[in-house]
Amino acid sequence: MTIPSPDNLYPLPDYARTVLLRPLVKNPQIEIGEYTYYDDPLHATEFEQRNVLYNFGAEKLVIGRYCALAEGVRFIMSGANHSMAGVSTFPFTIFGGVWGEKTLDIALGAPSRGDTVVGNDVWIGYNALIMPGVRIGNGAIIAAGSVVVSDVPAYGIVGGNPAKLLRTRYSESDVELLERIAWWDWPAEKVTEHVRTIMAGTPADLAEVAG
């Protein structure tokens, strides 16, 4: 029984548009879980440069395991924020010189929305835009073209601009059950043994094999 390796940059032979992000990403401010992939026919290996934007601050992008990221998914990091402490939002500080000297404390004092965190088993659709500091729960689905400006609950489906909760995939009790099971934390061997149940079963079915 061959289990796909989480360290294989190209998990599909002769299919360079799909890459696993964990072996690709080198920036310590970006943390990616095993088997999370990005699909892009032209720029798959440029994820750090093209899809994680304005990553200038201390904030991190954290993405869990088994997430599916479609082409054009972008994460706007806190470095994109401009100070709104006064009348103008123009970023004088970045131009250095006297402007930088006079305004550095203002730029450094701008509030941060914190890390951007994506849970496990999250599907993010084509050209979705995730704004700074957003937290997306396990099992969530982000519709294509969405602009996500606020947190997404576990197993929620959101869409639109700004993205709004369209529905939840399961009842509250089933979501709690799935969060407890946390199949994404299982060893790859156990995931492989029960992959059909994970992919097509109900929360109750998964609970039966969770052990």
Image (cartoon, rainbow, N blue to C red):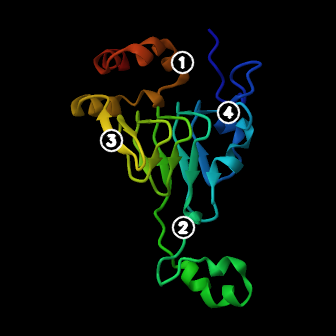
Real-space Cα separation, disc 1 to disc 2, in angstroms: 43 Å
Measured as percent of width and height from the top left, residue 47 is found at 68, 43
- State which tag comes first along the sequence, 3 or 1: 3
In the rendering, which numbered label is found on residue 40? Answer: 4
In the rendering, which numbered label is found on residue 165? Answer: 3
SS class, disc 1: helix
Q: Residue at x 61, y 50 (%)?
A: 30
Of 148 and 153, which appears nearest the observer?
148
In the rendering, which numbered label is found on residue 132? Answer: none
SS class, disc 4: loop
- State which tag comes first along the sequence, 1 or 4: 4
Of 108 and 211, which appears nearest the observer?
108
Q: Residues within 10 Å of mark 2 (few under 14, many from 20)?
A: some
Q: Is residue 156 above or below residue 29?
A: above
SS class, disc 2: loop
Q: Which residue is mark 2?
A: 81
- State which tag comes first along the sequence, 1 or 2: 2
Q: Residue at x 69, y 48 (%)?
A: 50
Q: Amino acid at mark 1?
A: Glu
Measured as percent of width and height from the top left, residue 143 is found at 45, 36
Label pair 1/2, CB-CB below 8 angstroms:
no
In which quadrant is the N terminus drawn? top right
In the rendering, which numbered label is found on residue 189? Answer: 1
Real-space Cα separation, disc 3 to disc 2, in angstroms: 25 Å
Q: Residue at x 42, y 18 (%)?
A: 198
Q: Amino acid at mark 4?
A: Asp
Q: Amino acid at mark 2?
A: Asn
Q: Residues within 10 Å of mark 3 (few under 14, many from 20)?
A: some
Real-space Cα separation, disc 3 to disc 4, in angstroms: 27 Å
Label pair 3/4, CB-CB below 8 angstroms:
no
Real-space Cα separation, disc 1 to disc 4, in angstroms: 29 Å
Measured as percent of width and height from the top left, residue 130 is found at 50, 49
